[in-house]
Amino acid sequence: MPSFSDPWLHPWLPAISARSTTSPVLEIGCGHGDDTAVLADAGLRVIAFDLSRAAVAAARLRVPSAQIECRDIRAPFPPQASELGAVIASLSLHYFPWDETVSIVQRIRDVMRPGGWLLCRLNSTEDHNFGAGQGVRIEENYYSVDGQPKRFFDEEAVCRLFDGQWQRVSMTHQRTRKYVRSKALWEVVVERV
């Protein structure tokens, strides 16, 4: 799938840098390294992973300064991922049943220090160009779309996912043309309390 520049991280770079002076940034689901390159170009140490071997190979070539691994998000995080000040998860938390999604977010919280930020983007229930409300329903707002499980979030689900142990910094509904067609998503920044 072709992709275009999507500078969503740029406004957040000063805050990410301020929180990552003594620890690397963990990027979950780095794909071909678009966000990895932005983070590395900002002078940050980056530990990244993705499930796709092809994507990891491309990201390693693109950002040789980053530590990039092929890893499933459900597996333990890299050993260096502890006491983190920032974690990035752009469009990588939507493949799982609700209970597993909640568990993954808790595991992310567990590797962060208090005051650390999680910056993530989540599929929106308005993301009709990429399968929202389509395919075979598995559970509420979770579908098998062309054989691929995909979760779509409404505002209530985003709030529920980050309720309790996170302080909301920002939550906005946006559209991007990163994948040529308009994609609806939630951009969320939360602080570990």
Image (cartoon, rainbow, N blue to C red):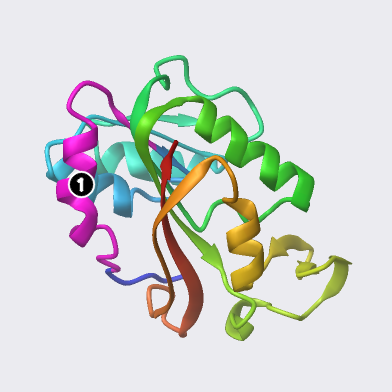
- The correct choice, above or below, for 46 with respect to 181 in the image is above
Q: Residues within 10 Å of mark 1 (few under 14, many from 20)?
A: few
Residue 145 as seen in the image, left or right of residue 27: right
Q: Secondary structure at mark 1?
A: helix
> Residue furthest toward the top?
79
Q: Is residue 12 magenta?
A: yes
Residue 173 image point, x, y percent: 46, 76
Reply above or below: 102 against 12: above
Residue bounds of the magenta highlight: 6-26
Residue at 74% across / 42% down in the picture?
A: 100
Q: Is residue 23 magenta?
A: yes
Q: Between 106 and 29, which is closer to the camera in this rendering?
A: 106
Q: Which residue corresponds to the image point at 48% horizontal and 21% vertical from the top-left?
A: 78
Name the residue located 32 percent from the left edge and 72 percent from the top edge.
4
Instruction: Between residue 104 and residue 161, name the one nearer to us.
Output: 161
Q: Report which residue position mark 1 lands on.
A: 15
Q: Position of residue 110 (x, y in %)?
A: 53, 26
Residue 21 occupies which quadrant of the picture? top left
Residue depicted at x 51% and y 58%? 91
| Residue 161 place in picture, x, y as percent | 63, 53
Disc 1 residue type (three-letter)? Ala
Badge count: 1
User: Where is residue 159 shown, x and y percent of the image?
Assistant: 59, 61
Q: Is residue 59 above or below residue 176?
A: above
